[in-house]
């Protein structure tokens, strides 16, 4: 695990005043990474770190040659048009750059003027995906989500027996992953309309979102050489918000027995900023497994890591309809929960992914699966909130939703906050459903 160090000190402040404002997602204790450029500029994309309401342009910073040694080497990797090489460099490089950037941005830094010249207002940037994603895997690791979905059909239903023994997952599609702001067309596919005896091929009628986190893989592993559970976090660079858009009617018809295909492969949206595992260190919390449940097999057993393997990341889903946007009404809040309730931890997902010999590569993306909490108002997908569309949800302005309508924008937010630690945030992950393309 990462120990706390001076970069986590809650009293630390930046010479940039907006970084010290209450409620800011990007104080000096956060320092998340993205890839961006000035909006509409046609410039090359490059790595950046968020601070207050600004982005520190790492390519511009590198040109000023302010950093020595290992930090300079790490900066050269992080300044590129994708973060893959920086992710591959591992925890030593990540930590060297974090500490060097913290020093440059801290109150009283001698080079503040030179660094200030490398800032771009966040309001004026556009983002690219932070890495070339060779492979994308989506897990299914929230017991509350799984139970909520099973119980729409049968109130007494339990999850399948394997759920409590292994972190379930399917191999997803990397080609349609987009960065926040993604707009995509409602997919077409085969589904069985209610009461029908034969399927139709038509635009999805049960469009949904899934509140998830994305885990970005750092150094990969060679095929046939699994990552051991006690090493798994050394292979984890950081965390972003992820929306796994889901076509429920298509999913119901197609997924038995091989899993989702059309239902999931048309769009997945991630937030641009990756909050590093180092930044999340103050928000580690105990991972627990009820004594009555199966205990993990040895290759998934966290051992001493149980004390710190869960992450208390608070999450929220909001929805803004086209009508609400036109009327100037803000988005309606649908859900608030925390990732700390997840049945399987990030380390267990990585260990299980590679346990059979599968190779991961730097920049691979792993979805955690929908994150739902145990209480009311903690469901991470519309199918749970609206009971399969049967109990539409009030979104204000006289509008209700059983599933998403064309023009709906879903906004995910995440942050960490507790007494004795600096609040850090993830920014937002926003995506909009457009009408199906006419064919
Ligand atoms: Ca999912």
Image (cartoon, rainbow, N blue to C red):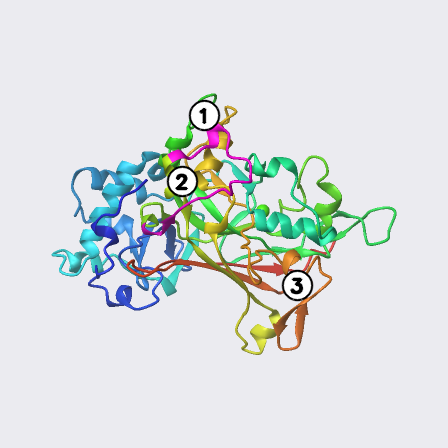
Q: Ligand 1 near label 1 (Cβ, under 8 Å)? A: no
Measured from the top left, where is residue 83 in percent x and y? 37, 42
Q: Report the residue marked by disc 2.
A: 306
Q: Report the residue marked by disc 3.
A: 406
User: For the point 56% across and 34% down, which residue is it?
Assistant: 165
Q: Secondary structure at mark 1?
A: loop
Measured from the top left, where is residue 162 in percent x and y? 62, 35
* Residues at marks 2 and 3 touching, judged by CB atoms closer than 8 Å: no
Crowding at label 2, few (<14), some or many (≥20) Cα neighbours within 10 Å? some
Counting residues from the start of the chain, the first of labels 1 and 2 encountered is: 1
Crowding at label 3, few (<14), some or many (≥20) Cα neighbours within 10 Å? some
User: For the point 49% across and 37% down, which residue is it?
Assistant: 349
Q: Secondary structure at mark 2?
A: helix
Q: CA distance from mark 2 to mark 3?
A: 43 Å
Residue 218 can be seen in this image: no
User: For the point 57% across and 38% down, which residue is it?
Assistant: 164
Q: Is residue 264 left or right of residue 356?
A: right
Q: CA distance from mark 3 to mark 1?
A: 43 Å
Q: CA distance from mark 1 to mark 2?
A: 20 Å
Q: Quadrant of residue 27?
A: bottom left
Report the magenta residues as a range: 282-303
Measured from the top left, where is residue 306 in percent x and y? 40, 40
Question: Which numbered mark, 2 or 3, is in the foreground of this view?
Answer: 2
* Residues at marks 3 and 1 touching, judged by CB atoms closer than 8 Å: no
Question: Which numbered mark, 3 or 1, is in the foreground of this view?
Answer: 1
Q: Residue furthest left?
A: 110
Q: Report the residue marked by disc 1.
A: 226
Counting residues from the start of the chain, the first of labels 2 and 3 encountered is: 2
Determine if the magenta segment contains residue 357: no
């Amino acid at each position: 695990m990462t120990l706390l160090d001076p970069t986590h000190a809650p009293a630390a402040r930046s010479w940039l005043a907006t970084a010290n404002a209450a409620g800011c997602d990007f104080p000096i204790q956060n320092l998340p990474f993205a890839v961006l450029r000035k909006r509409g500029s046609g410039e090359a994309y490059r790595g950046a770190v968020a601070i207050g309401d600004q982005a520190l342009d790492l390519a511009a910073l590198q040109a000023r040659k302010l950093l020595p040694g290992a930090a300079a080497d790490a900066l050269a990797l992080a300044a590129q048009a994708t973060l893959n090489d920086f992710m591959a460099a591992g925890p030593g490089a990540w930590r060297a750059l974090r500490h060097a950037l913290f020093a440059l941005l801290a109150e009283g830094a001698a080079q503040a003027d030179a660094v200030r010249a490398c800032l771009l207002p966040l309001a004026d940037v556009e983002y690219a995906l932070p890495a070339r994603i060779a492979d994308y895997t989506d897990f299914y690791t929230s017991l509350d989500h799984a139970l909520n979905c099973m119980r729409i059909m049968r109130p007494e239903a339990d999850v399948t027996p394997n759920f409590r023994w292994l972190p379930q997952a399917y191999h997803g599609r990397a080609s349609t992953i987009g960065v926040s702001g993604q707009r995509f067309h409602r997919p077409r596919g085969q589904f069985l309309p209610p009461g029908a005896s034969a399927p139709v091929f038509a635009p999805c009628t049960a469009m949904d979102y899934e509140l998830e986190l994305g885990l970005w893989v750092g150094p990969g592993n060679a095929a046939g050489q699994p990552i051991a559970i006690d090493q798994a976090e050394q292979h984890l660079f950081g965390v972003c918000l992820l929306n796994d858009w889901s076509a429920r009617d298509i999913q119901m018809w197609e997924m038995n027995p091989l899993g989702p295909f059309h239902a999931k492969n048309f769009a997945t949206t991630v937030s641009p900023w990756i909050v590093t595992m180092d930044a999340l260190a103050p928000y580690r919390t105990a991972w627990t497994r009820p004594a009555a449940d199966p205990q993990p097999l040895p290759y998934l057993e966290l051992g001493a890591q149980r004390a710190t393997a869960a992450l208390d990341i608070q999450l929220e889903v909001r929805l803004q309809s086209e009508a609400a946007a036109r009327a100037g009404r803000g988005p309606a809040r649908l859900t608030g929960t925390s990732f700390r309730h997840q049945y399987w931890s990030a380390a267990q997902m990585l260990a299980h992914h590679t346990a059979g010999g599968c190779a991961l590569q730097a920049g691979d993306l792993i979805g955690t699966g929908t994150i739902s909490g145990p209480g009311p108002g903690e469901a991470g997908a519309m199918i749970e909130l609206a009971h399969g569309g049967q109990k539409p949800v009030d979104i204000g302005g006289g509008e209700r939703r059983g599933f998403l309508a064309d023009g709906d924008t879903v906004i995910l937010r995440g942050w960490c906050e507790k007494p004795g630690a600096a609040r850090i945030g993830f920014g937002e992950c926003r995506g909009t459903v457009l009408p199906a393309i006419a064919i």
